Image (spheres, helix red, strand yellow):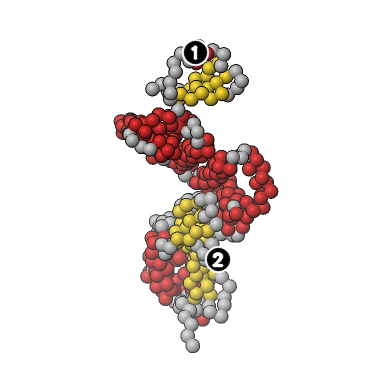
Amino acid sequence: METGVLILDKSDTSLFFSKPNEYFTVIYKKKTEVMLVVDLGKWMNKTLINWGIDPAVADRFDETIMALLMIVVAIVLNYLCQAILIGGMKQYTRRKPHQWNTLLMKRRVFHNLIHTIPAFLVYSLLPMAFIRGKELLLISQKACVIYIIFSLLLAINGILLMIMDIYDGRESMKDRPMKGFIQVLQVLLFFVGGIVIIAIIVNKSPATLFAGLGASAAILMLVFKDSILGFVAGIQLSANDMVRPGDWVTLPSGDANGIVQEITLNTVKIQNFDNTISTIPPYTLVSSPFQNWRGMTQSGGRRVMKSITLDLTTLQFCTPEMLDRYRKEIPLMADYQSEEGVVPTNSQVYRVYIERYLCSLPVVNQELDLIISQKEATMYGVPIQVYFFSRNKVWKEYERIQSDIFDHLLAMVPKFDLKVYQYSD
């Protein structure tokens, strides 16, 4: 049986009648042209009658059965294409695993593109199956077109995800999260694709639907409010380098205090130090203050700032005997000499000791500020503020280091004839 579509000049009767065939249908397109179309429905009708089916039943279901057979052929063709083309691509990827082909396979770009091949085949054959059933032809062709568009949308979406993978894989780009922007493009992609699909279903021009959406802009703004705010906030966060994945951030409200895990279109995911997860809208970080500890982690140390409160009644001027005892009993004070003509207090000598002790520790960064100062006396005593930077910034080690240092400093207070203030009723 011959297949295909032939455009014939109506005046050329010799060509038209030279190969008569009961399975061809003549369709007049213009006054001077006819179209000779293979009518698969007629072929199926005769086949059913030959099988003993009642002609009335055959006339009713011949085109439907033909369409179902086309779908079966399309499914088989899709399976063969997937097995041959995708199988070959997998073999090539295993032999030569380049970044582009690995990501194309991971994001199923080829898989979705191959789905369109049988859809195009069915779309082109449907006019041969539905010569009489024009409504069924229209519905079937619309279904094919929608399937093709959806497959293409999935393929394009896979390409967007592939771009994000490539972008995130670059070491220099890890501090610039791309996920939020890709999500915006995904929203736009499926929004436009949805409008096109709806236009096909209602038999309207997509431009007409887009024009009609102008009147519904306020509703769309309300529906996509979070996405729009998130997109704008994401641009601000990225452009101003306010937060990156891996940053330690603290919100004054106490809603989050931990490491930023992910920045998306609608959320910033933060893993708190108690291993709970907080999800914060991106515009919250733009519209309200928060603390980013990145500067600390990138610097040479993590700050320690604590105070030791001395009992005011124990402060006194040092006698020569006291100074000699300090030099003998405390190795770090062995070469201590007070300024000429100045009688130091025991609190002053203690502050000198704290500074010398901190300078002797490798964990203290000497290149950053190291300040030992006396603050204003209160009803609770005289605070000695100790301010320095630990080279180790890891939370666990940082806490251990500062605890060990202040244990030592508190234990050394009595050596200088001082007492730590301790409230009692």
Relative depth, front residue between 397 and 194? 194
> Residue 94 location, x and y as percent?
31, 33
> Is any atom of residue 54 visible in this view?
yes
Q: Which residue is mark 2?
A: 253
Residue indicated by mark 1: 15
Q: Residue 72, located in which quarter of the rendered image?
A: top left
373 relative to 87, above or below: below
Q: Residue placed at 43% from the left, 63% from the top?
A: 276
Whether residue 89 appears in this view of the structure is no
Report how far apart the C-alphas of labels 1 and 2 lie in the structure: 86 Å
Residue 168 at x, y percent in the picture: 45, 42
At x 53% / y 75%, what residue is drawn? 382
Q: How far across and down, in percent of the image, does residue 263 sit?
A: 50, 51
Q: Given the image, on which type of amino acid does mark 2 rest?
A: Ser
**409 or 267: nearer the viewer:** 267
- Local secondary structure at mark 1: helix
The answer to whether residue 304 is above or below residue 105 is below
Q: Is residue 188 left or right of residue 421?
A: right
Q: Residue at x 47, y 69 (%)?
A: 350
- Where does the image place residue 307, in percent across and percent down from the top left? 50, 70
